[in-house]
């Protein structure tokens, strides 16, 4: 009989909220989070209700601004930018370094907020915070040579990013852009990360960093955050539909921009035999339920090697641990080391379940379907946002799972017989952020890898154990997101 689990003492959402009130009373009030603009925290916007994906209970919702107030915030940010761009680099470096020290002091609270707001397991939540801190410290150390002969942008940088990495993508970008001499604006992601980003920005604002943090719908705020003439650069990370609209707007205006959009990242297996090296990597691909921009939901496997591939793939996927990120058997136990917890919300879990069912109805072969009954949950817990791992063989071309990123714990396997089929299957979405090719022969790899991700320049580089990766690398610290376009 499975042991009865309980919530780890001191980790409840109420505990985290009280710690926020104590750590940054200027940014948090008893009933809501505030917006930050013009260097001041404002109790404006309409606070919407929100629930945590972890167990469906209420948490703080975003205080959504209207378009008029958003334009005021952008104009105020330009005023901040005009002063900040003339602050000497040593002073900017000192203020960013002080912010990093403050983030380190509140590391545990930031990670706990990520658990509740977006469902990250504790280990991965801590990693998100650490990657932000370590990544920005790298830029602090390297900024002199990087900024040599360059000047800040003519206006602030406007940042719009998805919810999955509030710290290591969004907070990281804000601090690097500020370090380079720019005022920075961010919209809190619609689906989560509000309290975590608010705390991080409160710590930055205390050190004099010119940061603006506002909440609102993309449709209502896009005119201000994307098209305003005051904006010097737009940085967008997210889905293709919204990204296309942003791309059109910045292209029409000739505005400097950074765009990162989703794609179906694929892992190819071709003339490969080092299965012992591949086995431990399979389970890692399910970190955070594949809710990562660099996740691999597609494996393209040479048919003649399929039996050997399954011999390492299926044991790995069957070992995946899913559950409540803060549930323990005894109060003194450490929180569980899970592969993933909930998806971002119940609607996403249902969408994935419907797509899997539809794909099977149309001919996909289910190779593995996990069961939430085997998960790590509290008694009677709401499981509506949870989805077990699923693996499908040969999804039909009519299924979204054939060509689009599922952003959830669903793998699709495609069998191929020729190199041409391999490349076609790896490029099914006509663009991806990363791609990996596992191949024993370096010559074959060198020929195929540059064609495995057509939307990105190929920077082929050998990886351990005969597995090679073709990705869009940048001159940034390992694991940190590049924060380009911060200077001109």
Image (cartoon, grey):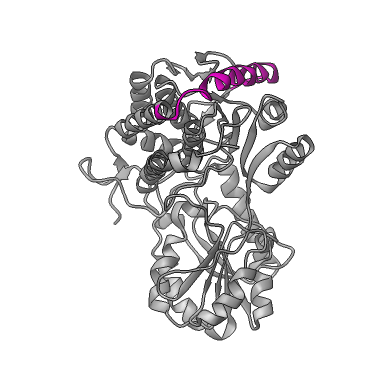
Image height check: is 382 above or below 418? above
Residue at the image point whose x is 72% and y is 42% from the top: 247
Specify the farthest residue to the right: 252
In terms of depth relative to the viewer, which is nearer, 483 or 402? Answer: 483
Residue at the image point whose x is 56% and y is 76% from the top: 446
Residue at the image point whose x is 59% and y is 40% from the top: 485
Specify the farthest residue to the front: 149
Image height check: is 370 above or below 15? below
Q: Quadrant of residue 362?
A: bottom right
Q: Residue 297, percent across and down?
A: 56, 61
Image quadrant containing the N terminus: bottom left
Q: Residue 328, percent across and down?
A: 28, 45
Task: State left or right for residue 379 relative to residue 397.
Answer: left
Q: Quadrant of residue 187?
A: top right
Look at the image and say whether residue 383 sits in the magenta stretch. no
Q: Is residue 211 visible?
A: no
Image quadrant containing the C terminus: top right
In terms of depth relative to the viewer, which is nearer, 388 or 95? Answer: 95
Image height check: is 91 above or below 322? above
Q: Residue 459, percent across and down?
A: 55, 64
Specify the farthest residue to the bottom: 304
Task: State left or right for residue 134 relative to residue 165.
Answer: left
* Part of the protein shown in magenta: 64-90
Q: Residue 312, percent across and down?
A: 43, 75
Residue at the image point whose x is 29% and y is 47% from the top: 4
Look at the image and say whether residue 66 sits in the magenta stretch. yes
Helix, strand or loop for the magenta stretch, by majority: helix
Q: Is residue 459 visible?
A: yes
- How many marks the image carries: the answer is 0
Q: Quadrant of residue 346?
A: top right
């Amino acid at each position: 009989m499975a042991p009865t689990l309980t919530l780890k003492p001191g980790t409840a959402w109420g505990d985290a909220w009280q710690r926020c009130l104590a750590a940054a009373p200027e940014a948090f009030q008893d009933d809501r989070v505030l917006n930050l603009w013009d260097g001041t925290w404002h109790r404006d916007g309409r606070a919407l209700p929100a629930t945590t994906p972890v167990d469906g209970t209420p948490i703080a919702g975003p205080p959504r601004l209207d378009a008029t107030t958003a334009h005021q915030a952008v104009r105020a940010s330009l005023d901040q930018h005009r002063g900040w761009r003339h602050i000497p680099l040593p002073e900017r470096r000192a203020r960013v370094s002080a912010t990093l020290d403050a983030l380190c002091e509140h590391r545990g609270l930031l990670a706990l907020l990520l658990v509740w707001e977006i469902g990250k397991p504790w280990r991965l939540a801590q990693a998100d915070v650490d990657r932000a801190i370590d990544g920005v410290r790298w830029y602090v150390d390297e900024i002199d040579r990087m900024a040599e002969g360059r000047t800040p942008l003519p206006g602030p940088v406007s940042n719009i990013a998805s919810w999955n990495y509030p710290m290591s993508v969004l907070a990281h970008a804000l601090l690097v852009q500020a370090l380079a001499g720019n005022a920075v604006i961010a919209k809190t992601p619609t689906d989560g990360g509000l309290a975590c980003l608010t705390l991080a920005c409160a710590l930055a604002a205390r050190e004099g960093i010119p940061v603006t943090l506002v909440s609102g719908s993309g449709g209502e705020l896009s005119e201000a955050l994307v098209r305003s003439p005051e904006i010097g650069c737009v940085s967008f990370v997210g889905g293709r539909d919204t990204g296309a609209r942003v791309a059109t707007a910045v292209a029409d205006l000739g505005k400097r921009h950074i765009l990162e959009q989703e794609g179906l990242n694929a892992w190819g297996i071709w003339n490969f035999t080092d299965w012992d090296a591949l086995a431990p990597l399979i389970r890692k691909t399910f970190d955070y339920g594949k809710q990562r921009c660099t996740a691999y939901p597609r494996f393209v496997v040479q048919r003649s090697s399929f039996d050997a591939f399954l011999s390492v793939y299926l044991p790995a996927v069957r070992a995946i641990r899913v559950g409540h990120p803060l549930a323990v058997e005894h109060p003194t136990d450490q929180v569980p080391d899970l592969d993933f917890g909930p998806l971002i919300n119940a609607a996403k879990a249902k969408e994935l379940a419907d797509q899997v069912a539809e794909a099977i109805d149309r001919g996909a072969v289910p190779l593995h379907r996990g069961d939430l009954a085997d998960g790590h949950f509290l008694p009677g817990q709401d499981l509506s946002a949870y989805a077990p791992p699923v693996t499908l063989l040969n999804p039909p071309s009519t299924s979204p799972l054939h060509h689009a990123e599922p952003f959830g714990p669903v793998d699709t396997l495609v069998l191929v017989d020729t190199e041409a089929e391999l490349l076609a299957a790896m490029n099914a979405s006509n663009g991806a952020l990363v791609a990996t090719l596992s191949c024993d022969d370096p010559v074959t790899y060198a020929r195929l890898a540059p064609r495995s991700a057509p939307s990105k320049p190929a920077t082929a580089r050998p990886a351990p154990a005969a597995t090679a990766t073709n990705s869009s690398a940048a001159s940034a610290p390992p694991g940190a997101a590049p924060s380009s376009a911060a200077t001109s």
